Every structure is written in structure tokens, then in C-alpha cells.
Image: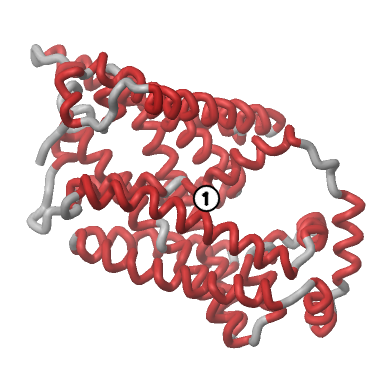
Amino acid sequence: MWVSRGWKGAMGFLSSFSFWLAQAAAAGAIAYFDPNFFGTFFNQIGLTGLGHWINSPAGTIIIGLGIIWFVWLSHIISIKSVGWTSVILMVLMFLGGFFIIYYGLANTPADYAKALQAHGINMNHYVALGKAKAPVASLSDLPKALFIMFFAFVGFTSMSQASGETKNPKRTLAIAFPLAVVIITVYFILYAVGVYHTVPWQYILGQLLSGHSSMINGPALMGYVMPEAIAAFVTLMVAFALFNDLPPIYQTLTRLFYSWGVDEILPKWMGNINDRGVPAVSVTVNTLIVSLFFLLTVWFGWATEISVVSAAALFMYVAVGITSLTFIDHAPHLEKESALKHNILVIFAALIAIFVPSWLFIEGITTSLGEKWYLQSIVQWVIVMAIGGFIYYLAYKKAQQKGKSLEDTMKELPHS
């Protein structure tokens, strides 16, 4: 909302619309990943028939759609149910990750080789394959990797969508943002260190080259050095961890649609609130859209959708950087509500926020240019942004017909 006010007119809306695209596509991709972990869990506890069915194409679609609409239900009930769901799933996520970190640091590649041998797998075979096919390390590959890994951090800003429903949001969010970044970054690093302390990266590459991509995840890799019961428990916790990404993402999607309804960029009824204080129409419409993105992920593959997520989110962060420099000039009457001032620290941070995402955005979209045209992230992003531009154009013309100015409407922050 700050960006839509601080970067005039259509560009302000389109930057926010790009971020909405990133969140919607991310939700669809997460719903696609999650059934695999539930299927693996049932295989590990001996219910192989159910596990194989969940991992089948039909099972993935049914379970994935079930997850999406369960999140819809929790939102329709109340915002408190969303909060409690997120807190419980967060605790389960850290609990599952603790076991992966612990067993990763407690074992060595030699221990891993013995564990694989007990399951009839020759680790040296895959390690040799990985070494033989490994590309020469180059710093030029770093931005391409960062472009994809950006997906892991795409949900951080979702906490800001709860600002209107949070007690003392100025203090709470000011603490939550840096605290979340530090905790999750440390968690990610420890998780990676734990896995690679035990599992040689060449083995992972060898498995990927052999077409075993479904086995390249933390629980599947580390399960060989864990007791069977703990391995199954960790798999279930990771499934819940992925699930935990969806409630806050839904908040982003639904609150953006609600705000656009209030601004009358979307139909006014999109901003309707039910008797439980929930924008029920927005929640339902976005759930249908997330279901569509989920089916697109099934069709196109997860790699394409993750590229779209990263491209769309990076564009939004460029907009944040630009807004930090232009906000006071475009919306001087809102300066008192903003902590942003034109000092050297803000200017330096804004320039970084413009340069780094722009660099990753360009590197990421050029990487996908070798794909079929409809699989290229830039093509999918441009198509959706064109739809956003058309939506804004219709709203702009409608406001003119009523003798109003859409740009004047977007000068003020909406207040409940």
C-alpha cells in the first residue's frame, strides 16, 4: 500500500500487482510440493498404498487442492484461527528441522556411506557421477542461484499484511521484521550445514543427474542416518512446515484484493467484510486463483513457477527502493505517517534495494530464455502484468466517468 501511494498511478498499482502475482504463484507451488512429503510419510510408516496414491498425479492434485481450500476455511472462520494455525505449524517446523540439524552434525560422510550400503545403495557411484558431471564453479552462476533461492524468502513481507489486525503494529512489526530475518537465516544456514556435513554434495548432484529429484530433500536424504520413527516424524514436520507458508501468503493476497476493492480498482464488493471481520469475497476469489496457479505448476513444472515468483517479487522490491526515494515528493501530506526521511542512510539502503533486485531480476530472466517461449518467466510475468495494466485502465476510465480521479484516491492510505 505504501508503494502504491509513493509511486504514482499505474506504476504504483502494477508494482503491488506484481507482488500479488509472486504470492499467488508461490502458494500454488507450495501446494504442489507438500503432497510429496505427506506421501513419503505414509510410505515410511508402512502405509505404502496410501503413500503411492498421494504421490501419484491424481493424488497430488486432490491433496494439493485440499490443502489450498483448508487454508481458505481457516481464513473464513476468523483471523485468530489463522494466527493459531501459523503459530502451531511454526513450532512443528522448527522441531522437525532440529532433528535434521542434529543428525547432520552427529554423522559424517563415512557414516552416510554405511547407512546407504545397508539399503543397497552405492554412494561412491553417485559421488563419482556428480564429480564427473559437476560444472566448473564460477561466480557468474551465483546470481542465477540467488534468483531461485530468493523464493525461500518470499513470505517475509507477508507479516506486514497483518498490520491492521495486530495489536500495537508499529512496535510489533518493527521487532518482528529483523527478528524473523535473523532467526530464519540462521535456521536455513544450520539446516544446510547439517545436511552437507553428512551428505556429500557430489552424491546429491549424482542423484539429480540420475533422475531421482524426488529424493533430493532434507527428510529423504537424512532419513538414512535416523531411526525410522524419527525419520517419519521429520518428514511429517517438513510437510507441516511447507503448509505453514500458506496462511501468511493468503493474508497478502486477500488484503491486497481488499485494498484494491476499497480503492475501487477492483469491484467495490471485493472490499466487503463479513460479520467475523474477514474479507470473505477476497479470500474466496484468491483461493480460486491459487488453485489455478497450482494446476499451472502441475502442468508447467515447479521450476518455471518458482522463476515467475522470484521475478515478480524482485520487481516489487525494486519498487520499494524507488518509493523510498520518491515517497516524500509524491505524497508529502503522508510524510508524518512515514519513518522515511531523506538522509544518507535511507538513500544508501534505497539504492541497494534498487540495484541488487534489478541485477538478480535480469540474470534470472535471461537464464530462462533458452526454454520454450511459454515457459520463460519473463513471458509469464509480462502476460500477468498486462492483465494488471488492463485492470488499472478500466478502473481509471470508470473513475473518470464518475468525475473522480483514481490518482487522487491513491494519494491517501485506506483506514479501517
Residue lying at 33% horizontally and 52% vertically, measured from the top left: 176
Q: Picture quarter containing residue 395? A: top left
Percent across and percent down for residue 127 are: 87, 62
Position of residue 366 relative to residue 8, above or below, is below
Q: Quadrant of the N terminus?
A: top left
Residue lying at the far front of the rendered structure: 344
Can residue 284 be seen here? The reply is no
Q: Nearer the viewer, residue 353 or 124?
A: 353
Residue type, label 1: Ala
- Report whether 392 appears left or right of 385: left
- Report whether 370 appears left or right of 300: right
- Report whether 167 appears left or right of 365: left
Position of residue 361 relative to residue 42, above or below, is above
- What residue did someone put label 1 on? 152
- Report whether 112 appears left or right of 342: right
Q: Picture quarter containing residue 90? A: bottom left
Residue lying at 73% horizontally and 77% vertically, measured from the top left: 107
Percent across and percent down for residue 122 are: 88, 73
Q: Quadrant of the C terminus?
A: top left
Residue lying at 15% horizontally and 20% vertically, measured from the top left: 333
Percent across and percent down for residue 70 are: 33, 64
